[in-house]
Image: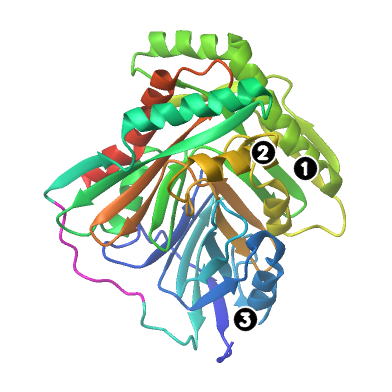
């Protein structure tokens, strides 16, 4: 770090949403809302990123801090959207100006001073897209053939489940503004975790892990059914989802893996005895809350992220052969899709969602991915339709920008 950075956190009134045209890093949930402007510091994490996350804590510790708030996420905070593939490098961003609020009613602003790039952030004029086209990166018929190949491997006994994704491209006549899209996602999906990091945006319903003090939480999801908008029909679909042996088995695999991965870090850990159904935009999922108390010395949230990713909900089971098959069958790398996305503070507090319902913005294009869990009795046509349903969450927000 070439310059000594200083973070000062002070109480503030409600700042409102991030302004359009700004460079934003954000993560907002029902418990805590964080959004930052600009880039005070980029922390590069060498490959493989899951084995080198200690560099983040080291970098945050070098930032001098004056904290009049003393709450989780006050002081210096780093945001990241990490690659799905842990063999790749990662990067964290510390914003110049961070606005925070929590469910206890606290609001604050943290300003990083003496940064190398204090002006890299403010805002630029925004022109809204007027022409939008949507296309598949891979022909849908070819993608269905990939599902059939995955089923054949499963029936052969190579694995019990693999998650395959499909890329959808949205081309526009003007660049899509990240702050505008983020604000739209927050409005459309208030019960999800909305995030934006370096052009990667989304609204995920699935909490990979959070660590606040000694309390650890995860909210894994696996098993999906569409929502119709009719409460009676959706209630019937939810009941069928809970009653489905296929979905319950798929869900339990994920819960068991999350529980086993977190247990070595905990003095106490428990999971809900039966899953619930959580609505998430155009779909609803089976979900189970896992919650516990961490042992001393309390690990950083980044230790827990490294232990958990990737879960069977985004990779498959067993994990190793499923990841090998994903690398073989998916012609396009996932990038940050389905990777951990969230924040960490200098005390190791933080929260990371699973980076689904997401889009990567690049110039005049948004790249969307949607994934589905393939098992022995999966129907390729139904799985294709599920990817379309999941993609609607982002497409709706982009069209309305």
| Viewer-closest of 379 and 97 | 379
Write down the residue under mark 1.
261
Write down the residue under mark 2.
321
Name the residue located 79 percent from the left edge and 32 percent from the top edge: 270
Ranked by sequence position, the earlier of labels 1 and 2 is 1
Q: CA distance from mark 3 to mark 2?
A: 42 Å
Tell me where residue 119 appears, x and y as whole percent: 36, 82
Of badges 1 and 2, nearer the viewer stands 2
Tell me where residue 288 appears, x and y as whole percent: 65, 28
From what the image shows, is residue 79 above or below residue 336?
below
Res 170 visible = yes
**Image: magenta residue range:** 121-129
Ranked by sequence position, the earlier of labels 3 and 2 is 3
Q: Which residue is at the far left?
A: 130
Tell me where residue 102 appears, x and y as whole percent: 54, 52
Where residue 325 sits, quadrant-wise, is top right
Where residue 39 sits, quadrant-wise, is bottom left
């Amino acid at each position: 770090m070439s310059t000594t950075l200083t973070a000062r956190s002070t109480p503030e009134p409600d700042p409102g949403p991030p302004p359009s045209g700004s460079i934003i890093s954000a993560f907002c949930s029902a418990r805590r809302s964080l959004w930052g402007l600009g880039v005070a510091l980029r922390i590069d994490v060498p490959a493989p990123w899951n084995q080198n996350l200690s560099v983040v804590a080291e970098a945050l510790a070098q930032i001098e801090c004056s904290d009049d708030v003393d709450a989780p996420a006050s002081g210096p905070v780093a945001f990241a959207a990490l690659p799905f593939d842990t063999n790749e490098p990662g990067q964290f961003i510390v914003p110049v100006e961070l606005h925070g609020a929590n469910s206890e009613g606290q609001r604050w602003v943290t300003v990083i001073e003496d940064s190398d790039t204090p002006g890299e952030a403010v805002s630029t004029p925004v022109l809204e897209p007027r022409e939008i086209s949507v296309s598949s990166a891979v022909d849908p018929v070819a993608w269905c053939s990939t599902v059939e190949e995955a089923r054949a491997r499963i029936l052969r006994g190579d694995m019990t489940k693999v998650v395959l994704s499909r890329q959808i491209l949205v081309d526009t006549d003007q660049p899509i503004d990240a702050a505008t899209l983020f604000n739209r996602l927050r409005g459309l999906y208030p019960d999800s975790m909305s995030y934006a990091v370096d052009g990667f945006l989304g609204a995920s319903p699935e909490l990979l892990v959070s660590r606040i003090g000694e309390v650890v939480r995860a909210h894994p999801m696996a098993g999906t059914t569409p929502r119709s908008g009719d409460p009676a029909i959706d209630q019937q679909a939810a009941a069928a989802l809970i009653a489905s042996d296929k979905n319950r088995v798929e869900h339990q695999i994920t819960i068991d893996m999350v529980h086993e991965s977190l247990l070595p870090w905990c003095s106490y850990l428990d999971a809900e005895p039966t899953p619930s159904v959580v609505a998430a935009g155009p779909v609803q999922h089976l979900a189970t809350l896992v919650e516990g108390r961490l042992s001393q010395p309390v690990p950083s949230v980044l230790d827990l992220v490294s232990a958990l990713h990737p879960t069977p909900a985004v990779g498959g089971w067993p994990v190793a052969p499923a990841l090998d098959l994903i690398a073989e069958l998916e012609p396009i790398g996932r990038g940050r899709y389905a990777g951990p996305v969230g924040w960490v503070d200098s005390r190791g507090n933080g929260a990371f969602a699973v980076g689904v319902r997401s889009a990567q913005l690049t110039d005049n294009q948004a790249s969307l991915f949607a994934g589905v869990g393939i098992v022995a009795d999966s129907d390729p046509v139904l799985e294709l339709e599920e990817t379309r349903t999941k993609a609607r969450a982002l497409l709706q927000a982009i069209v309305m920008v």
